[in-house]
Image (spheres, grey):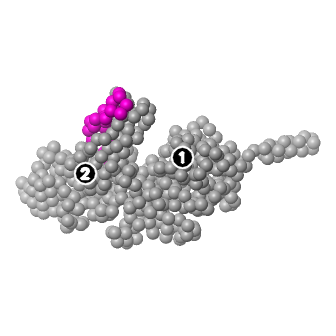
Amino acid sequence: MRFFFLLFWLFNTLAAYAQPAIQDHVRAFAQDPELAGALVSVSVVDVATGQQLGAHQAALACIPASTQKLLTTAAALELLGPDHRFRTQLIITGALSPAGELNGDVYLVGGGDPSLGSPFLEGVPGLEALLDRWRERLVAAGVKRVNGRIIGDGSYYGTDAVAAGWPWSDIGNYYGSGAYGLNLHENFYFLDFLQRSRLGATPPIQQTRPEVPGLRLTNELRSGPRDSGDQAYVYGAPFGYDNYVRGTIPVGSGRFTIKGALPDPPLFAAQALCRHLEAGGIVVRQPAASDRQMGSGRTVPGRVLDTYESPELAVLVDRTNLRSLNLYAEALLRAMNKDRGAEQHDLATTEVLTDWLEAAGLPTAGIQLEDGSGLATRNFFSAGFMTAFLRRQATAERWRESIPLAGRTGSMRGYLKGTAAEGRLWAKSGSLGAVRAYAGYAVRPDGKEVAFAIMVNNFTLESKDVRKKMHRLMLSLCQ
């Protein structure tokens, strides 16, 4: 009997040694000839003990892209609290006559809510439902005619909506829309094109949804190869209405839709409400405007007709990380700065993040943060820093729920399905030009949990091919 026991022990011991160690997988990944010349930083640590299980240049600072949202959302949950809500108010000023004539203005006063009128967030009234709500409040108050204006007040965060380090090729697109004091419809519009069958032909613009008054689009788009995907970019600046569309969409015979950034969300909100009121029979005498155009900040005292509250912060954090939305991360950054009493011109600064990281005992000497979302190209920190942060956050259950789960949720829903990683690997992705990154947690076959960060900068491969290599490395952590 003892002989068979020893034989069984020896077999399992040899089998264990035959399994490649995590460090072997990391080394093979880092030495891949197709990544020659790229900057690679990898760190894998045991969550319970902090033991380093695999590493390659773990102290090398790299651009983290959207994995940086993990820092911003963790800080927001602790500093603002998971139950924090953003508020938007509908206010009327001036006297209201018995006949329903308002001798004043109607204000939409933003409180920084990034989800206001979201077309995608469950439980949130969409744009039309929200406009209906505000019209009903005005009708209930007896307003039949507005002799002043509808004014969108975005002064809560000021005009510094877009981080200084964001690329020109990004800020006209939905993911570069920035965070304003008054946001609406996630600060984007759908832009529909009619595809053409000939390579190089210009697909004509069909429409924007919703309508964006004053937007002028110069169409320089071309038709690219079939199945080439969305390679179209809108070039435009905040508050600028002369935009250009460049790049390609695939040849075809149907409608192809991209998303552009609203040039001025507070003004758009006022214009949308003005049109909605007039369609419902409430006359508005003066053109819609924003507080920026009117030269005013925060409204004069008036009568509050409605206070709309966003979902709790924990829900917004889920959307931030599961869908990697820059707008939400930037709104959270500004909310944290606002909460600690920062001046308006400092609401986009990141000291609140570095201060929180330092207070958590994390080393910040080798990191640089320029925004809250990771879209800026001069953010940098190492994979080793990220895994130290992930160890610190390992017990933050509500925050961890926001990280995409392989084969199940968010941006990882369609990846590693049917593998050992499905349901056992949580990973936040990050992607910029020549930048790919992943960070999260994985459960090993023996039940132990590891934290990992994989960053690759300056590669020359197709981004999708780098992603596949990174997925293979992440899969190995679960085998």
- Which residue is more in the foreground, 361 or 29? 29
Does the rendering let one see residue 311? no
Residue 197 is one of the magenta-drawn residues: yes
The magenta span reads 188-209
Q: Amino acid at mark 2?
A: Tyr
Q: Is residue 226 above or below residue 385?
A: above
Whether residue 60 is visible here, answered yes or no, is yes
Q: Which residue is mark 1?
A: 460
Q: Residue at x 33, y 62 (%)?
A: 160
Q: Residues within 10 Å of mark 1 (few under 14, many from 20)?
A: few
Q: Within the magenta stretch, is there residue 25? A: no
Q: Residue at x 89, y 42 (%)?
A: 7
Mark 1 residue type: Thr
Which quadrant: the N terminus?
top right
Q: Say which mark, if any, is on residue 103.
A: none
User: Which label is found at residue 241?
Assistant: 2
Q: Element type at marker 1?
A: loop
Residue at screen point 12% across, 45% down: 281
Coordinates of residue 5 in the picture (x, y in percent): 88, 43
